[in-house]
Amino acid sequence: MDSREFAKTLGKQVAGFCKSLDNKLPAYSYIPLTTDEMRVKVMQSRLFNEIRAGEIFGGWLKSTPELDVKKTLARAVHEEYEHATFLEEALRSKGATPYDYQALPAQMAMFNAFEGLTDTVERIAAFPMAGEGVADYLIAKCLQAGTVPSWITDPYRRIHQDEEQHGNYPFDILVKYAITAEKQERAARAVAMSLVLRRAYFENLDRWVYEDKIY
Ligand SMILES: [Fe+2]
Ligand SMILES: [Fe+2]
């Protein structure tokens, strides 16, 4: 398949997953949450994601031969730690300790799975495209909801701006490098893996926020 057509197919797959969340928005989106105690828990979990995302992108640098992708990943590392700073500040403003948090089992599994991917096309499809695509979809919803407090929406407005600015880079990388049937097959499986693990993380986070259970 033409790589642009292929990248569009993956984009549609991610968009379909996003739509499937609309009926019952996860705690991750902040929208259904009713107390600051719950919101702090979600933000701590998402702060962990920023830190872990930077680690993953940075960890991929040496094994990424494509220089343009390498540079993009390096910029992404820096950006994730800027996001982490925004969330740390927001948590401190609520009197919370930002890193008083232990990763949930499904959250650990999701990031460990990203970390284990070895091919550029697979990596970009699984994480920047599918993973961050879903995250940013829910950030946009959170900002539009009008019911989420400003100590949450202020930092996420800045994060959303960053994600919007370079929103197309995973697509462009796939167009450029997902040029064989084998690469496309691997990328499609990686997106499916990412979405399955994302759903598990959202469910795990819901369970922790609403029932104080970690599995
Ligand atoms: Fe990001
Ligand atoms: Fe981020």
Image: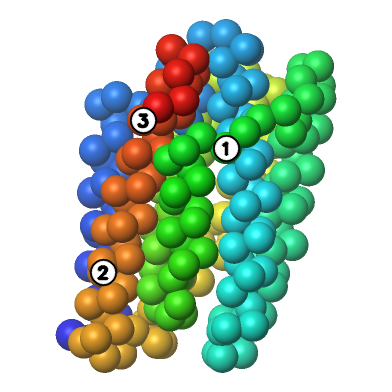
Tag of residue 151: none
Amino acid of disc 2? Ala
Q: SS of the residue at dot 2?
A: helix
| Disc 1 versus disc 3: nearer the observer | 1
Res 55 → quadrant:
bottom right
Q: Are marks 2 and 3 in contact (CB under 8 Å)?
A: no
Q: Mark 2 and mark 1: span between their CA atoms?
A: 27 Å
The quadrant in which the C terminus is found is top left
Residue 45, percent from left and from top: 59, 34
Q: Kindly identify the residue that appears in the image at 64 percent across and 21 percent down.
A: 40
- Number of residues whose C-alpha sits closer than 10 Å to that of mark 3, classed few (under 14), some (14–19) or many (20 or more): some
Residue sitting at the far top: 35
The earlier-in-sequence mark between 2 and 1 is 1
Which residue appears at 26% of the width and 67% of the height? 189
Q: Earlier in the sequence, mark 2 or mark 3?
A: 2
* Residue 145 visible to an observer of this rendering: no
Secondary structure beneath disc 1?
Answer: loop
| Residue at mark 1 | 103
Tell me the SS state at disc 3. helix
Taking the image as shown, residue 59 lies to the left or right of residue 25, namely right
Would residue 14 be visible to someone looking at this image? Answer: yes
What residue is drawn where x is 44% and y is 49%? 109
Q: Is residue 102 left or right of residue 7?
A: right
Residue 10, above or below 50: below
Residue appearing at x 26%, y 91% in the figure: 180
x then y, percent, for residue 183: 30, 84
Q: Position of residue 30 (x, y in %)?
A: 51, 24
Q: Which residue is mark 3?
A: 203
Kindly identify which residue carries mark 2: 188
Type of amino acid under label 1: Ala
